[in-house]
C-alpha cells in the first residue's frame, strides 16, 4: 500500500493570496493619486476661475488682474522754476547819530516803531547853539556896517580924484579896504550859517523811512557824533530785497532776460516751503562768478506790504525763468525709471490691459512732470499699483465692478438683477458659487467605495 501523498502541481489556475494583496495595493495607489488630482483641480479652480469674463478682463486666459489707479495726461502750461536759498537784505540800514554834542533832552520814538524820513526822533539841549547863532549874527552886522562906511569913503575919494584934488594912491587904498571888508562880511555870513545849522542839528530826525530798532541812549545822557552806537538803528523794510545764488550755467539765461526787459516772477517761501511769504520780481545779477561755489549772486525786490520778510532772514526762493506752453504733463507718480530709461504704463481701456511705453521727461513741478515725447494728451497712465505690472498685464480700473476673485470678470459689468453667466434662471448666487465645488466632491467620495469593493472581491 503506497502511503505517499502527491503534492499539487506548481502551476495552478488559482492565484495566490500574496498576488491578490499586491493587486489591491496597486488599485489603492491609483485611487489615492486620483483623489489628490481631483483635490488639486478643485483648489486651482476655486482660486483661478477660468471664465470668458476673466479672459476679456485680463487679456490672458485665467491671469489675475491688478487694481490700479489712473490719471489722464493733460496739456497745460508748466513754469520753469529755479530753486535757491536767499537772504533778506534791506535796501538801506542807517545808524542814527547826532551831528552835534550836547545833552539828550527828549526821545520821541518807540522801539520797533515805523518812522518816515524827516520825522523828529529826539532833541538835544539847543541853548548853546542859539547863543552861538546870536554871536555870529552880531559879528556879521558889525562888519557889514564897516563895509558900508568904507564904500561911502571910496565914493567920495573917486569924486575928488576926478577933480584932481586927491592922490590916486589914497583912492586905491580905500578900494582895497572895501574889498577886504566884503570878504569879512562873507565869512561872517558863513559862520552865521554854521551856527544856524548846528541849531538845527539839535533836532535829530529820521534820515530814511523804516523800522526803528532798540534804543541805545536815554534822556539826560551827553551824546556826540563820535558815539559808536548812536541813538537808534533804522532799517528800510518796504520795499526789501532778497539776495540769492544761482548756478553759473543759468547766468547767461538770466542776463538775456534782464537785457530784454522781460519781468521774471520770484516767490519767497518760508523755511518749510509750505507757505509763500511774498511775491516779487527779479532785479539784477552780479557781474562775476564766485570761483569757490560756482554761482552768481542775484537780487530780487519785494514790496513786503505785509512785513512778512525780515532783514537777514533765510528764505527759499523760486525764480520763474519762463513758461512752457501746451506741455503734456502727468503726475510724478506715473513716471518710472528702468534700465532702458524712463517709461510709463499706458492703459488700453477696451482690453483692460496696460502697455509699457518709453518716454522722455522734461521740466518738473511739485506734483506734475512734463513728458517731452512718447505720450499724447488724453491718454491714461498708471499712477498706483505699477510695481506689480508688466507689459500687457490685465488691470482693474477705478469704477469697475469685478465679479470673481483676483479681478476676474472686471471687464464686463452685470445688469442689476440679471442672473450670472452660465447659471440657471432663478438660481441664487450662493448656489452658483457652490456648484463647481460639489462635482469634484462626489468623485472624491466614490473613490473609497470602489476601494472597499475591490478588497472584498479579492478576499
Image: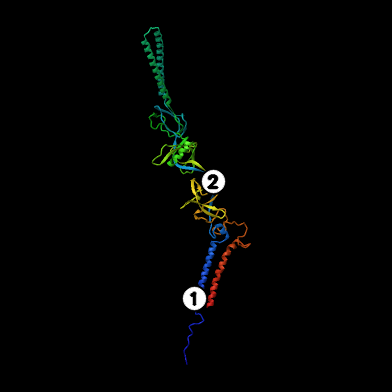
Q: Position of residue 273 (x, y in %)?
A: 47, 43
Front residue (pair 278, 243): 243
Q: Is residue 157 above or below residue 377?
A: above
Q: Is residue 393 above or below residue 324?
A: below
Q: Position of residue 388 (x, y in %)?
A: 50, 55
Dividing the picture into quadrants, the one containing residue 418 is bottom right
Q: How many marks?
A: 2
| Callout 2: SS | strand
Q: 131 left or right of 386?
A: left
Residue shown at 53% from the left, 76% from the top: 455
Q: Nearer the viewer, mark 1 or mark 2?
A: 2
Q: Is residue 282 visible?
A: no
Q: Earlier in the sequence, mark 1 or mark 2?
A: 1
Indicate how the structure is coloured in the image: rainbow
Could you give the CA–CA distance between mark 1 and mark 2, rounded to whole angstroms?
Answer: 78 Å
Q: Position of residue 177 (x, y in %)?
A: 38, 14
Dividing the picture into quadrants, the one containing residue 170 is top left
Q: Position of residue 47 (x, y in %)?
A: 53, 61
| Callout 1: SS | helix
Label 1, residues with CA under 10 Å away: few <14, some 14-19, many ≥20: few
Q: In this figure, which residue is indicated by the disc labeled 2?
A: 75
Q: Residue furthest bottom?
A: 1
Q: Residue furthest right?
A: 426
Residue shown at 42% from the left, 39% from the top: 296
Label 2, residues with CA under 10 Å away: few <14, some 14-19, many ≥20: some
Q: In this figure, which residue is indicated by the disc labeled 1?
A: 22
Front residue (pair 25, 306): 25
Amino acid at each position: 500500500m503506497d502511503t505517499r501523498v502527491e503534492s499539487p502541481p506548481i502551476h495552478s489556475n488559482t492565484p495566490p493570496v500574496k498576488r491578490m494583496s499586491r493587486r489591491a495595493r496597486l488599485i489603492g495607489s491609483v485611487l489615492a493619486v486620483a483623489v489628490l488630482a481631483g483635490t488639486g483641480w478643485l483648489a486651482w479652480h476655486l482660486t483661478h476661475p477660468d471664465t470668458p469674463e476673466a479672459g476679456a478682463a485680463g487679456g490672458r486666459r485665467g491671469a489675475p488682474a491688478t487694481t490700479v489707479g489712473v490719471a489722464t495726461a493733460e496739456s497745460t502750461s508748466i513754469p520753469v522754476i529755479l530753486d535757491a536759498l536767499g537772504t533778506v537784505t534791506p535796501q538801506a540800514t542807517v545808524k542814527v547819530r547826532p551831528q552835534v554834542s550836547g545833552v539828550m533832552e527828549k526821545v520821541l520814538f518807540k522801539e520797533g516803531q515805523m518812522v518816515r524820513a524827516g520825522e523828529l526822533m529826539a532833541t538835544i539841549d539847543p541853548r548853546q547853539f542859539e547863543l552861538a547863532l546870536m554871536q555870529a549874527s552880531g559879528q556879521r552886522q558889525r562888519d557889514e556896517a564897516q563895509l558900508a562906511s568904507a564904500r561911502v569913503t571910496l565914493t567920495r575919494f573917486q569924486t575928488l580924484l576926478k577933480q584932481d584934488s586927491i592922490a590916486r594912491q589914497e583912492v586905491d587904498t580905500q578900494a582895497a579896504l572895501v574889498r577886504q571888508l566884503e570878504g569879512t562880511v562873507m565869512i561872517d555870513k558863513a559862520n552865521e550859517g554854521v551856527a544856524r545849522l548846528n541849531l538845527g542839528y539839535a533836532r535829530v530826525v529820521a534820515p530814511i523811512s523804516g523800522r526803528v530798532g532798540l534804543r541805545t541812549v536815554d534822556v539826560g545822557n551827553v551824546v556826540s557824533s563820535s558815539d559808536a552806537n548812536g541813538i537808534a538803528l533804522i532799517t528800510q523794510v518796504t520795499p526789501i530785497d532778497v539776495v540769492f545764488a544761482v548756478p553759473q550755467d543759468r547766468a547767461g539765461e538770466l542776463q538775456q532776460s534782464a537785457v530784454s526787459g522781460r519781468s521774471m516772477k520770484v516767490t519767497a517761501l518760508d523755511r518749510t516751503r509750505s507757505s509763500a511769504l511774498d511775491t516779487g520780481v527779479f532785479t539784477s545779477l552780479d557781474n562775476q562768478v564766485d570761483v569757490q561755489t560756482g554761482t552768481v549772486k542775484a537780487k530780487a525786490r519785494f514790496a513786503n506790504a505785509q512785513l512778512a520778510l525780515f532783514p537777514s532772514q533765510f528764505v527759499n526762493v523760486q525764480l520763474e525763468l519762463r513758461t512752457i506752453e501746451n506741455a503734456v504733463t502727468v503726475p510724478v507718480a506715473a513716471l518710472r525709471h528702468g534700465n532702458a530709461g524712463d517709461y510709463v504704463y499706458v492703459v488700453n481701456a477696451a482690453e483692460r490691459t496696460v502697455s509699457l511705453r518709453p518716454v522722455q521727461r522734461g521740466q518738473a513741478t511739485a506734483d506734475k512732470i512734463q513728458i517731452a515725447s512718447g505720450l499724447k494728451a488724453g491718454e491714461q497712465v498708471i499712477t498706483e499699483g505699477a510695481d506689480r505690472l508688466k507689459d500687457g498685464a490685465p488691470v482693474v480700473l477705478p469704477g469697475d465692478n469685478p465679479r470673481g476673485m483676483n479681478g476676474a470678470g472686471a471687464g464686463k459689468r452685470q445688469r442689476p438683477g440679471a442672473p450670472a453667466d452660465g447659471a440657471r434662471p432663478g438660481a441664487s448666487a450662493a448656489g452658483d458659487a457652490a456648484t463647481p465645488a460639489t462635482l469634484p466632491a462626489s468623485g472624491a467620495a466614490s473613490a473609497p467605495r470602489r476601494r472597499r469593493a475591490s478588497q472584498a472581491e479579492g478576499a
